[in-house]
Amino acid sequence: MENNTKVILAIEEYCLKHTGAYEARPFGEYPICYKVMGKIFAQLIPEETFYKITLKCEPDKAYLYRQLYPEIIVRGYHCPPIQQPYWNTINLDDFSDMEMLFQMIDEAYDAVIHKLSKKAKMELLNLSELEFKDTDGEDQDFAMLCNRLDSALDEIVGGKFQRSQYEQYNQRDNIHDVIVAYREGKPIACGSFKMYDEDHAELKRIYVEPSYRNIGLGAELVRRLEAKAKIKGYRWCILETGKPLEAASHLYKKAGYKIIQNYGQYADMPDSICMERKI
């Protein structure tokens, strides 16, 4: 298989066609990882000197492929021995059957899905009806959802007066990384982050329309925002929420966020709760 942009783009496009799949770079520039529900099913390294893809496998099929393509398909190069039966690495310089490669990507995806809990499988089924768009703070759908978020927060905390001190920290003009979720063309959820410092991305403006809550959409937005932040070189995600926002706090804690001392502009705001997670 010739190492060229066309082939790399074909692999990327095929991986991202799978329901709930998104790109992540948890280990640095390479490998380019493809995840579903936070789990990796494919890892691509598109370098001239190490042109390979590592795919999740069921052990019996993994062994079969190694037998069919000796020295071209081997145990996962990066894996400790206990994990190697579940991963295959394919040398793309010597592998030319794209149809077979796509079949192995399908099987890698299915291997991850098979291990999900019933609840996670149901969440993925719900997410299969959605589309996710990368955009920025000027996006009008994002602006509309932010307005609905502000109205919802006003109701929860008792009105605009109590929230006025926060407004200056939630302006969209300094937010450049946004994800908007759509169902049948209708914007139903959003999330974003902005630079806090060189190591920290601050999650902002995460909102899900009430009729689409409790299907795992908030958690999916957080996973995708973390993946984008990691690709941009951040090492941590931080956020601010409020003591009255119990559902939001529960979501973040479940995603692995820990409460920290209030940072920056929130240091003297007793109703704020600040959290962080290493990504």
Image (tube, grey):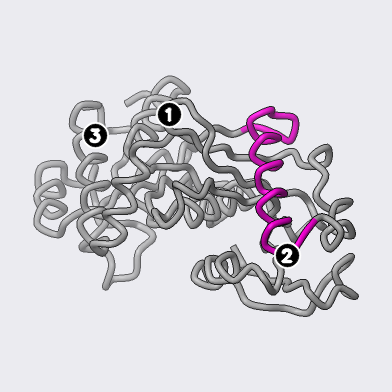
Q: Which residue position holds label 3?
A: 101
Highlighted magenta segment, given as a residue range: 135-159
**Chain-order first, disc 1 or disc 3:** 1
- Residue 255 visible in the picture: yes
- Mark 2, residue position: 157
Mark identifier at residue 8: 1
The stretch drawn in magenta includes residue 147? yes
Q: Amino acid at mark 3?
A: Leu
- Residue depicted at x 47% and y 40%: 49
Residue located 19% across and 35% down the image: 103
Q: Main secondary structure of the magenta part?
A: helix
Q: Position of residue 268 (x, y in %)?
A: 90, 75
Specify the quadrant of the image occupied by residue 15. top left
- Tell which of 152 and 87 is nearer to you: 152
Provide residue 147's location: percent of width, then percent of height.
Answer: 71, 41
Q: From this view, report whether residue 98 is shown above or below residue 238.
A: above
Which circle, 1 or 2, is nearer the viewer? 2
